[in-house]
Amino acid sequence: MKEYAKSFYKSKAWQRARRQVITRANGLCERCMAQGIYKPGYIVHHKKYITPENIGDNKITLDVDNLEYVCEECHNKEHKAKHNNSRYLFDGHGNLLPPTADHTPRGSNSHGGKRTEGVTSKKRCKVGRI
Ligand SMILES: [Zn+2]
Ligand SMILES: [Zn+2]
C-alpha cells in the first residue's frame, strides 16, 4: 500500500464504504458475476484509481459507484491492462510486487557460438514448415 493511502485505508469511512460494496456484491466478484460466474471477491477496487491528488475527495474514494468488489484475477487483469505490463503483479491497490525470478530460466543459451546459430536455424526451418 502506498504511503499516502495508508491513513485512508485505515479510516472508518473507508471501512464502511468497503463493507457496503462487499454486501452489495454478496461477497462475490462483481465482474465475474456479470458473466454468470460465482466467485468470491478479493478486494474492493476503485474504478477511478486513487492518487495523491484525489485521496481527499470523498466523491471518488468513498463513492460506492466508483467501487467494485473483484476477485484477485479480475483485479490483476484490471491493473495489468491499464499498465500494460504483465511482469508486475499488484497486491492490493498500488502495492507492487517484485517480479518473480523463476520466470526466466534461459540465459545460458544466449552466449552460444556458431553451434548455437546452427541449432537455431534448424529450429526456424521446422517452425516455418508448420
Ligand atoms: Zn472476478
Ligand atoms: Zn485496484
Image: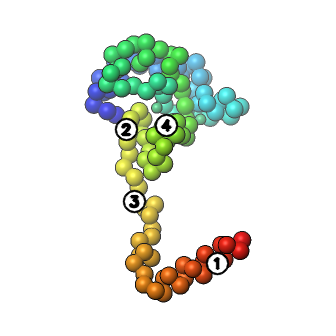
Q: Return the residue at label 3.
A: 101
Give the Cα distance between marks 1 and 3. 32 Å
* Viewer-proximal residue among 74 and 118: 118
Of the image marks 4 and 3, the number of the one nearer the N terminus: 4
Residue under label 4? 82
Amino acid type of disc 4? Lys
Label 1, residues with CA under 10 Å away: few <14, some 14-19, many ≥20:
few
- Which one is closest to the eye, mark 1 or mark 3? 1
Residue at the far bottom in the pictured view: 115
Q: Is residue 5 visible?
A: yes
Vertical side of 7 occupied by 124: above or below: below
Q: What residue is shown with label 2?
A: 95
Left-right relation of 94 to 122: left
Q: Which one is closest to the eye, mark 1 or mark 2?
A: 1
To which quarter of the image does residue 33 belong? top right
Tell me the crowding category of disc 4: few under 14, some 14 to 19, or many 20 or more residues within 10 angstroms, Cα based: few
- Number of marks drawn: 4
What is the CA distance from the residue labelled 4 to the residue labelled 3? Answer: 23 Å
* Callout 2 amino acid: Asn
Mark 3 falls on what kind of element?
A: helix
Most foreground residue, 69 or 16: 69
Residue type, numbered disc 3: Ala
